[in-house]
Image (cartoon, rainbow, N blue to C red):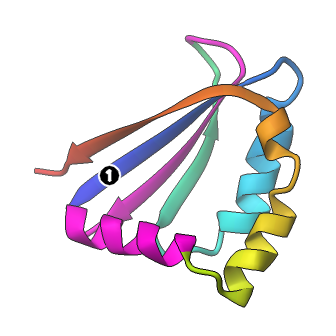
């Protein structure tokens, strides 16, 4: 099993907006475990935590998100403007022992 941390460094005042957007858009996705905002460390961070059985399952999920489906179009509409709210991001992948 693997755990994925997608971390977004938001512009000041936008972390809660990005977190809410993720929660509304991705909160029901079967692989998304939590949407987190910072309490310590670097400011203005949002972390989306997801879980997959394997890297292959993660890759398959990413391929599904790139398809031109109605579900993905709706998600993209809901996430419109998000790119203007963050500065940079990163992804960490952990193996669960």
Q: Residue at x 61, y 40 (%)?
A: 36
> Would residue 3 be visible to someone looking at this image?
yes
**Residue wearing tag 1:** 3
In the rendered image, residue 92 lying in the magenta stretch gets the answer no
Measured as percent of width and height from the top left, residue 78 is found at 85, 65
Indicate the quadrant where residue 11 lies: top right
Residue lying farthest to the bottom in this orientation: 70
- For residue 21, side relative to residue 52 (left or right): right
Front-lying residue, 84 or 30: 84
In the rendered image, residue 45 lying in the magenta stretch gets the answer yes
> Would residue 54 be visible to someone looking at this image?
no
Query: Quadrant of the image for the N terminus?
Result: bottom left
- Mark 1 Cα-neighbour bin, 10 Å: few <14, some 14–19, many ≥20: many
Q: Is residue 7 above or below residue 34?
A: above
Q: Residue at x 68, y 14 (%)?
A: 43
Measured as percent of width and height from the top left, residue 20 is found at 81, 50
Q: Say what secondary structure mark 1 lies in.
A: strand
Residue lying farthest to the left in this orientation: 97
Q: Residue at x 48, y 50 (%)?
A: 49
- For residue 89, side relative to residue 19 (left or right): left
Q: Residue at x 74, y 66 (%)?
A: 25
- For residue 83, side relative to residue 4 (left or right): right
Magenta range is 41-66
- For residue 53, side relative to residue 8 (left or right): left
Measured as percent of width and height from the top left, residue 94 is found at 24, 43
Measured as percent of width and height from the top left, residue 71 is found at 70, 84
Q: Is residue 5 above or below residue 37?
A: below
């Amino acid at each position: 099993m693997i755990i994925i941390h997608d971390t977004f460094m938001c512009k000041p005042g936008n972390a809660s907006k990005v977190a809410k957007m993720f929660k509304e858009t991705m909160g029901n996705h079967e692989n998304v475990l939590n949407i987190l905002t910072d309490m310590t460390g670097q400011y203005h961070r949002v972390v989306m935590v997801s879980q997959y059985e394997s890297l292959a399952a993660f890759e398959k999920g990413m391929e599904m998100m790139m398809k031109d489906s109605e579900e993905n179009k709706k998600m993209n509409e809901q996430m419109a403007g998000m790119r203007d709210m963050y500065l940079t991001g990163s992804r960490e992948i952990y193996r669960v022992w």
